[in-house]
Amino acid sequence: MPARKTIPRSKDDDYSELWARNRRDFVVAQTGAQLNHVGHYSALDSELQGNIENFLGVAQVPIGIAGPLLVNGEYAQGEFFVPLATTEGTLVASYNRGMKILHQAGGVKTTVSDDAMQRAPVFIFPSAREARQFGLWVSAHFDEIKVHADATTRTGKLKGIEQYSASRFQFLRFDYTTGDAAGQNMVGKATMAACEWIDSHYPGIEQYYLESNFATDKKTSLVNMLHTRGKRVTAEATIPKQLIEGLAHASVDEVFRIRQVATMGSMLSGANNNGAHSANAIAAVFIATGQDVANVAESSAAIAHAEITANGDYYYSVTLPSLIVASHGGGTALATQSECLKMLGCFGSDKVKKLAEIIAATVLCGELSLGGAIVAREWVSSHERLGRNR
């Protein structure tokens, strides 16, 4: 076997421009690729630690702006111009169109109905009977478990512990609020402290694992759609029939029918939602605002619903049951990302639910716009016009 080549690193100054350049030079020597653009960035050395390792540069993603988005929320109120980082042509234009229609309709009403982040340990026993007894003990000692979990964090609070049994395993799903942070690391630390206390106070545990894959980090799951992971937020609007007909060049009945067909198609395919493309808005806002982009796997789960009102207008809603966002921590403090959050008025403390409402409202605008394009048979022509490099 050839000797393994080691990426250049420094124990003392690894995030400096000097060591970023050393790594770029190393990559050029090893691969022959010319890195003429990767090394141009405005991030400061002090900002990068905790966000990246082996840093050598920045991936530049174009940012477009859509809006104004009119939101009638509990936390987000008024007009917003939404930054969308994407390389997909037509995307920003489509969201912009949806925002225009819903602005004319009076805006998007948004509601955050739940807030929970999980870690899900599993405890193993000699038999199912011992696992059941352990579950009863956990319920009886919740207050003590909560003390040890909450002691590890200033902002995280243990809300409850769900329990699921299978064979001789007792799965515990710890539910937390996490303040303005997304909170996966926070709840991992808190649950570790709780599990160590449980393990030292309950006899007969054969083994426990801090994560059983039941929290379903960065994976869509039914349990998160039912019980919430991150923020559970709904965006809804009633659109006058003349606006719908102008958008789709079709009657409200026809638009409603394609919504029913799309729900059936998603059910047959086993998709994580019955909407059109929630991941587009969520990924684009996530990249622009410094969210953990892999959380799109969970966050894009969506429940779309439509009705024709008594006077023939179109009620449309989207519920995002597992939207994982942060206004503090992670990548939100990086230079570009913090600017985008400030554009939305969502940087810093007590802003995370506002951000969740803006994202949900943006998703609804995109669902309406793309749905209209499909009914009007403008989907392909729009991408031909705006979405191809010439």
Image: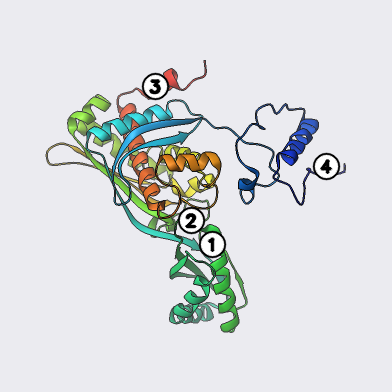
In x, y percent, where is residue 297? Answer: 49, 47
Residue type at mark 2 is Ala
- C-alpha distance separating marks 1 and 2: 9 Å
Residue type at mark 1 is Met
Residue type at mark 4 is Lys
Tag in front: 2 or 4: 2
- Which numbered disc, 2 or 4, marks the residue that appears first in the sequence? 4
Q: Which mark is residue 181?
A: 2
Tag in front: 3 or 2: 2
Which residue appears at 49% of the width and 66% of the height?
A: 154
Q: Residues within 10 Å of mark 4 (few under 14, many from 20)?
A: few
In x, y percent, where is residue 172? Answer: 49, 69
Tag in front: 3 or 1: 1
Looking at the picture, does residue 175 appear above or below residue 245?
below
Residue type at mark 3 is Ser
* Extreme residue in the left direction: 311
Is label 1 in contact with label 2 (beta carbons under 8 Å)?
Answer: yes
In the displayed structure image, the side of residue 29 where residue 269 appears, left or right? left
Q: Which mark is residue 382?
A: 3
Q: Which mark is residue 186?
A: 1
Residue 158 picture quarter: bottom left
| Secondary structure type for disc 3 | helix
Is label 3 in contact with label 4 (beta carbons under 8 Å)?
Answer: no
| Secondary structure type for disc 4 | loop
Judging depth in this view, the residue of 65 and 267 nearest the camera is 65
Tag in front: 3 or 4: 4
Residue named by callout 4: 5
Which residue appears at 37% of the width and 54% of the height?
A: 232
